[in-house]
Image (spheres, rainbow, N blue to C red):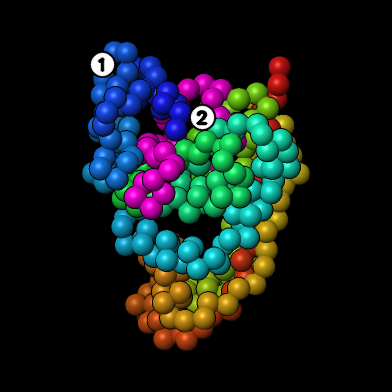
Amino acid sequence: MNPVFWRCPLCNESLTLVERTWVCANRHSFDRAKEGYVNLLLVNRKHSADPGDNKAMLDSRRYFLQQGFYAPLAMALGAAIREHFPDTEQTLTLLDAGCGEGYYLNQLVQFLGANVQCYGTDISRAAMRLAAKQYPALSFAVASSFELPVPDASVDVLVRVFAPASEAEIVRVLKPGGLYLWAYPAAQHLFELRQLIYDTPQPHTVEELPPLDTMQECPPLAVSYPITLPDQASIAALLHMTPYYWSASAEKQADCHHLASLDLTVDFAVRMMRKMIN
């Protein structure tokens, strides 16, 4: 673990781990939780008492992801990173901004190998608790993706899977030559589930983002394939981990809970950009 990767959210000085406390040169300190993560989200920057996904949603996501249904997305992200950084001896710093319970970050470190130093941030303390407990070799911090507690030009690869983020922050933290991968649902993602939830389901739409200063577009990735959820436990986990759970009526939820299996289309798009080298 890089001992000076995190920076103080109060003064931006580097944080160093001393026993169980992260401290900066100005003596601001942040305790390391027993699970291993550090909370760098200041109280006055929170929009609620306990922001982000709750434990029930995270538990459902973990159950679903560990069945391997989205493993092809993780493998596609890993392959894209290795294509851009083919030297397996090169040490890379990888940050998953909005990493949730840590599934994709762990998959990437398994794919890319020991020379990748992996870090994850999420605004949800429950997510960081789960991630740090499950993946103790990785480093996690409670933090907003709109104010990442990492130095300028310190990240080789920044991954963002579904999570909101500040594009300006992404540009700030990436090294020249660094790679940014943003995965999001494409038009047909889980459309069969949408048909069960909505009377007039519509394909996903994604706002077109303008070009980012100092960032060069790379060819995008498309990751699309069919899956079958073989039992009610998997169907329930998927429903509970998505926003559909909150928009579905009690009747629609009951219909989903009576299904014995469900055929679905998985459809992801991945936008990739590389920070220009001056």
Image quarter hosting the N terminus: top left
Secondary structure under tag 2 reads helix
Residue 234 in the image: above or below residue 92? below
- The part of the image, by quadrant, that contains residue 142 is top left
Which residue has dot 2 on it?
169
Left or right of residue 191, residue 214 in this image: right
- Residue positioned 60% across, 73% down in the render: 227
- Residue positioned 26% across, 40% down in the render: 33
Q: Are marks 2 and 1 in contact (CB under 8 Å)?
A: no
Q: Position of residue 106 (x, y in %)?
A: 50, 50
Image quarter hosting the C terminus: top right
Secondary structure under tag 1 reads loop
Is residue 147 one of those drawn in magenta?
Answer: yes
Residue located farthest toward the top when viewing the structure as drawn: 26
Residue 135 in the image: above or below residue 94? below
Q: Position of residue 222 (x, y in %)?
A: 70, 56
Asked whether residue 165 appears in the rendered view, the answer is no
Residue 127 in the image: above or below residue 31? below
Q: Amino acid at mark 1?
A: Arg
In the image, 241 versus 76, the foreground residue is 76
Is residue 135 one of those drawn in magenta?
Answer: yes
Q: Earlier in the sequence, mark 2 or mark 1?
A: 1
| Label 2 – label 1 distance at C-alpha | 25 Å
- Residue positioned 63% across, 55% down in the render: 75
Front position among marks 2 and 1: 1
Which residue has dot 1 on it?
27
- What residue range appears in magenta? 132-159
